[in-house]
Amino acid sequence: QVQLVQSGAEVKKPGASVKVSCKASGYTLTSYHMHWVRQAPGQGLEWMGITRSSSGNAEYAQKFQGRVTLTRDTSTSTVYMELSSLTSEDTAVYYCARERVEAYYFEYWGQGTLVTVSS
Amino acid sequence: EIVLTQSPGTLSLSPGERATLSCRASQSVSSSYLVWYQQKSGQAPRLLIYGASSRAIGIPDRFSGSGSGTDFTLTISRLEPEDFAVYYCQQYGSLQYTFGQGTKLEIK
């Protein structure tokens, strides 16, 4: 069965970077797009970007351009989200989510990774 | 960027009642790209409805979606205790994915 298992919670200081991983199993990583969505405490969902299925190319929401980097390692079926120049406003749960190509929605989600930014 | 506005912010109903949740877009959205999710506290969102009106696998038929253009609706025909949660709509357009701010469905 499809599973997306994310890395554990992180605590970072302002100005630092964080890298969250998402290990996919039960399907071929390169056959599906992978997205990252975040949710600040008590807030709604915010799309951050996509790693495209076959090419692995990444595209980012305008808000995060220049500050987020999405990568993947096909040998381990793992995708990564790195966010730099962290501030307290980046405190959130970060989710990876799978999209079937040209579906334009997220059918499977990781369990979420809490990133806390605090001095 | 297309903005999705959900209403009401909070909906208080009793089990057995009918729930109607609204999602309004700032400009026209293709029905193919309008989606609904359910999120329970401490959990990841769960896909409910895609293509505005198609139920995802395993979703009970008390959940239905409708609408077109700028106005979309999620209806839960008869609320079960497990349906009390937060509901989000989401759309895709111009290489961007955006979510509404959510409707909290709470027990009255």
Image: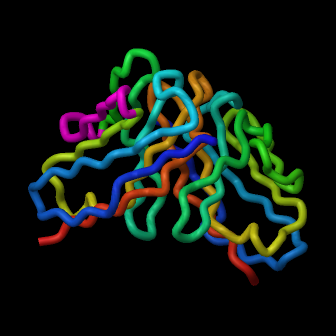
Q: Is residue B76 above or below residue A102?
A: below
Q: What is the x, y in percent for residue A22?
A: 39, 44
Q: Is residue A78 left or right of residue A12?
A: right
Q: Residue at x 24, y 43 (%)?
A: A82
Which residue is outermost to the front?
Answer: A75
Q: What is the x, y in percent for residue B8?
A: 65, 64
Q: How is the image coloured?
A: rainbow
Q: Is residue B34 magenta?
A: no
Q: Residue at x 39, y 29 (%)?
A: A51
Q: Residue at x 45, y 50 (%)?
A: A5
Q: Which sits in the foreground, A32 or B2?
A: A32
Q: Is residue B45 left or right of residue A79?
A: right
Q: What is the x, y in percent for residue A112?
A: 44, 57
Which residue is outermost to the bottom?
Answer: B108
Quadrant of the rendered structure where residue A76 is? Answer: top left
Q: Residue at x 54, y 57 (%)?
A: B44
Q: Is residue A75 magenta?
A: yes
Specify the segment rendered in magenta: A63-76
Q: What is the x, y in percent for residue A74?
A: 37, 26
Q: Is residue B35 above or below residue B108?
A: above
Q: Is residue B60 above or below residue B98?
A: below
Quadrant of the rendered structure where residue A26 is? Answer: top right
Q: How many marks?
A: 0
Quadrant (top left, top right, bottom left, bottom right) of the C terminus of chain B: bottom right
Quadrant (top left, top right, bottom left, bottom right) of the N terminus of chain B: top left
Q: Is residue A45 above or below residue A70?
A: below
